[in-house]
Amino acid sequence: TYANTSAELTERAPGLVGPFDALAGARLPGHAEHQGSVNLIYSAQWSDYNVAFNYGVIFTSDVYNIVGGAEDPLVDATAGDAPADRGGESLPGYGVQHVSLTVGKDNWTLQAYIDNLANKYYLTGTKGSRRFLADELNGPGRDINGFTQRSYGQNVGTPLTAGVRLNYTF
């Protein structure tokens, strides 16, 4: 499978990111431009058993956490369209492999699987932006009524996972 998504602003968006404007052509956040999967499946009949082996890879290109990410600058309209920063990031793309072996007979199916075969560390999203860790103008964190807020987090993909599934169809 393969999908291509080119989502971008068609015109200037005043005040879209905090107090800053995003310019036409800035890439929208939360999607990968390229993503897909490849699966190789070998199946055979062995005596009274159906046997299938599957190897696959899913892949995705980088994803921006806010409009424009780190590549497309925001602008401060109050400062003559000076470049502005809200801590946008481009989360790197990744490829994750999986394998499975399935054996079935009559109404029973037994499958052993491993997801994230190489135990790859990858990011799937963020909570907030790095701006909430340190503000370039005001120092570390974000002051909210005398309380320093530092709320930034990264969502991490599932590590290597192995298991067995047993199914009965009736």
Image (spheres, rainbow, N blue to C red):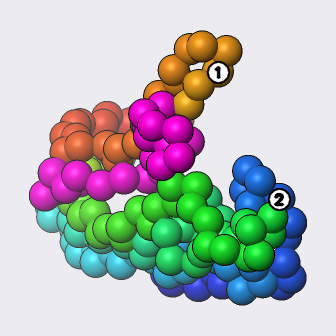
The residue sitting at the front extreme is: 79
Residue 12 seen anywhere in this rendered image of the structure: yes
Direction from residue 91 to residue 118 in the image, left or right:
left
Nearer-the-camera pick, 81 or 111: 81
Q: Mark 2 points at which residue?
A: 15
Region of the chain picked out in magenta, as a range: 116-141
What amino acid type should be assigned to the residue bearing mark 1?
A: Ile
Q: Which mark is residue 144?
A: 1
Residue 31 seen anywhere in this rendered image of the structure: no
Name the spot of residue 21 as percent of width and height, x first: 77, 67
Q: Do the residues labelled 1 and 2 touch (CB within 8 Å)?
A: no
Q: What element carries label 1?
A: strand
Question: Which residue is depicted at the point 72% across and 56% down?
Answer: 17
Question: Which residue is depicted at the point 43% across and 52% down?
Answer: 124
Name the spot of residue 116 as percent of width and height, x first: 23, 54
Answer above or below: position of 114 versus 45. above
